[in-house]
Image (cartoon, rainbow, N blue to C red):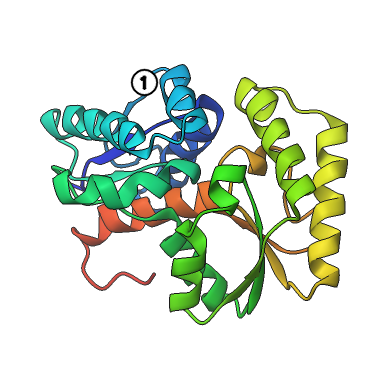
């Protein structure tokens, strides 16, 4: 049997997209209607938000570890977190984690290299784009990156936290992202990381000025490969 995937969830919309991608696309690898066993644990987003607002990354780590422990107890073999921002706490989590993790930025960086991109725009919450979550992984793969300007970070963060995580998708939010991505294209980027797991719900290759790297679906697909490759060694990446 494929390995049991554990999802450490933070915000509902992005986690739901990740979960759904695993279940729907599993059939392409395992046969009609098939997918690995999947379990997800989600504390209240308000708990995470309180930690983020107070810059309490140890608090974020404790929430992630609580989810990890519950998922380990019910049989998950490894963990993914469909939330880019809280990966900032992963260095505090991994030494105490009962299970191994896939890192969302590592998955995105590997895909960027595979597609021949060299310089990436980075879209996400202000906590994410001001962190080293992506820069460290991108640099390890020889990739350059461009962050949004400070005013852009503030507005994108507002769109994410006030709208996207609440399931509110406005044309104005799409237009603003298009403006920011167009500026990144002018700055030399050849692709953009959708580094908020809700952003793929409004942005994609069809409406973006740059090719997109959909962190949510890329993580889901990486989890599928990991779950299945234990059963079928050597399966193509």
Picture coordinates of residue 160 (x, y %)?
66, 33
Q: Residue at x 47, y 29 (%)?
A: 54
Furthest residue to the front?
A: 54
Tell which of 3 and 179 is nearer to you: 179
Relative to 21, residue 63 above or below: above
Q: Residue at x 87, y 34 (%)?
A: 172
Tell which of 33 and 155 is nearer to you: 155
| Horizontal side, residue 41 vs residue 181: left or right | left
The quadrant where residue 182 appears: bottom right
The quadrant where residue 167 appears: top right
Q: Residue at x 51, y 66 (%)?
A: 135
| Residue denoted by label 1 | 43
Picture coordinates of residue 220 (x, y %)?
43, 48
Q: How many marks?
A: 1
| Horizontal side, residue 109 vs residue 227: left or right | right
Tell which of 228 and 154 is nearer to you: 154
Picture coordinates of residue 63 (x, y %)?
30, 29
Quadrant containing the C terminus is bottom left
Relative to 183, residue 216 above or below: above
Which SS class for mark 1? loop
């Amino acid at each position: 049997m494929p390995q049991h995937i554990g999802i450490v969830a933070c915000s509902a919309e992005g986690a739901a997209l990740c979960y759904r991608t695993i279940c729907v696309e599993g059939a392409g690898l395992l046969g009609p209607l098939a997918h690995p066993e999947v379990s997800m644990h989600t504390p209240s987003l308000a708990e995470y938000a309180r930690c983020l607002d107070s810059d309490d990354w140890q608090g974020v780590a404790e929430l992630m570890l609580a989810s990890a422990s519950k998922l380990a107890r019910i049989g998950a073999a490894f963990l993914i977190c469909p939330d880019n921002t809280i990966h900032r706490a992963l260095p505090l989590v991994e030494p105490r984690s009962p299970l191994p993790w896939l890192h969302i930025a590592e998955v995105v960086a590997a895909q960027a290299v595979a597609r021949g991109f060299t310089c990436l725009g980075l879209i996400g919450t202000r906590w994410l784009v001001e962190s080293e979550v992506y820069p460290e992984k991108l640099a390890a793969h020889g990739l350059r990156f461009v962050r949004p300007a400070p005013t852009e970070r503030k507005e994108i963060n507002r769109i994410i936290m006030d709208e996207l995580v609440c399931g509110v998708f406005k044309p104005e939010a799409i237009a603003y992202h298009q403006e920011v991505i167009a500026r990144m294209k002018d700055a030399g980027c050849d692709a953009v990381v959708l580094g908020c797991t809700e952003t793929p719900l409004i942005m994609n290759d069809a409406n973006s000025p740059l090719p997109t790297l959909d962190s949510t679906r890329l993580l889901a697909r990486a989890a599928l490969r990991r779950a299945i490759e234990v059963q079928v060694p050597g399966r193509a990446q």
